[in-house]
Image (cartoon, rainbow, N blue to C red):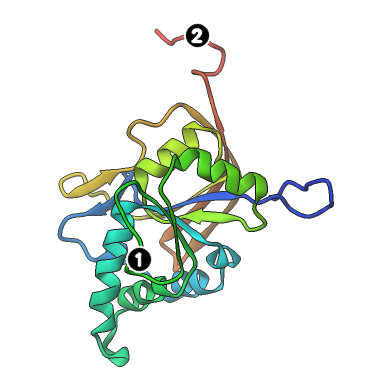
Amino acid sequence: MHEEVADGTSAPELLVDFIVSLDGYASAEGWPGWWGLEGPEYLRWLEEQPEGAYPALMGANTYRMFSRFTAEAAGVPPDEKSDEEATIGGVAAMPKVVCSSTLREPLALPNTQLVSGDAVAAVANMKRSGTTSIRTMGSLSLCRSLLKAGLVDRFRLVIFPVITGATGQERIYDGYPDVSLEMVDNRTFDGRLQLLEYVPTVLDGPPGGGSSA
C-alpha cells in the first residue's frame, strides 16, 4: 500500500518486520532460530518477497549480533549450513542502515551506512527525501521509537505457534502506545506460521476517549 507523490511515483515506506512467538517474544533462551519451525514455504517466501530488497534498518545491538553471526556462519562449509546460517550469511550482502551513537567506521559488515545522529529524525528524512522504502530488522527499541513518532507505514508479523512464557526474551510490545491496526494482508505458511500485516495508527488513548470501569 504505497502512497503516491506528486510525480506519480510511490513515496518511500517504512516497514516494521518481526517474527514473534504467540505470546509476543522475539526470541527464547535455549530455542533454535525461528523456534525450529521454519518450513520450505516460509523460507521460499523470505527469498521471494520484494521487501527483501529494501535496505535493512537496525540499531547497534542488532548490528553487532549479525556481525558476530555472519562471521561464525562464514566458517561453515556451504553444504553444512543450516537454513538459519545461510540466511544470516546473506546479511553481509544486503544494504543496511545502522543507527548508533557508539559504533564507529569502518564497520565490520560491508554495504552499511552509519547514522550517528537522532535516529527518528534520520528516518523521517529518509522517507521524505529518499527514493527507496526501508524495513527494520530486529531492533525492538528503535522500532518502538519509530512507531511512536508515527513513521511506520506497515507493521508485519510472522507468528510462530509457540508460547515461551518460561524462556521468552525481548518482549516486543512493552512500552508501545495504543495502536489501531488495519489488516492489509494475511496468509499461512507450511500450515502453521501466520503472517499478519497491518497499517498502524498511533492513538492518543482508547477509542472514545473514556476509560473502562
Picture residue at 23% right of the left edge, 66% below the top: 32
Label 1 – label 2 distance at C-alpha: 52 Å
Residue extending farthest to the right is 7
| Badge 1 amino acid | Pro
Whole-percent x, y for residue 198 in the image: 56, 44
Q: Which residue is mark 1?
A: 106
Residue 37, image quadrant: bottom left
Q: Nearer the viewer, residue 86 or 207?
A: 86
200 up-or-down from 87: above or below: above
Whole-percent x, y for residue 46 in the image: 48, 69
| Badge 2 amino acid | Gly
- Helix, strand, or loop for circle 1? loop
Q: Residues within 10 Å of mark 1 (few under 14, many from 20)?
A: few
Whole-percent x, y for residue 203 in the image: 53, 24
Mark 1 or mark 2, which is nearer to you?
1
- Helix, strand, or loop for circle 2? loop
68 up-or-down from 132: above or below: below
Q: Nearer the viewer, residue 50 or 189?
A: 50
Q: Which residue is mark 2?
A: 210
Image quadrant in which the C terminus is located: top left
Picture residue at 44% right of the left edge, 27% below the top: 177
Q: Nearer the viewer, residue 99 or 33?
A: 99
Q: Residues within 10 Å of mark 2 (few under 14, many from 20)?
A: few
Picture residue at 20% right of the left edge, 61% below the top: 31
In-image side of 173 versus 179 (left or right): left
Whole-percent x, y for residue 137 in the image: 42, 56
- Contact check, label 1 and label 2, Cβ < 8 Å: no
Residue 112, image quadrant: bottom left
First in sequence: mark 1 or mark 2?
1
Q: Is residue 184 visible?
A: no
158 up-or-down from 89: above or below: above
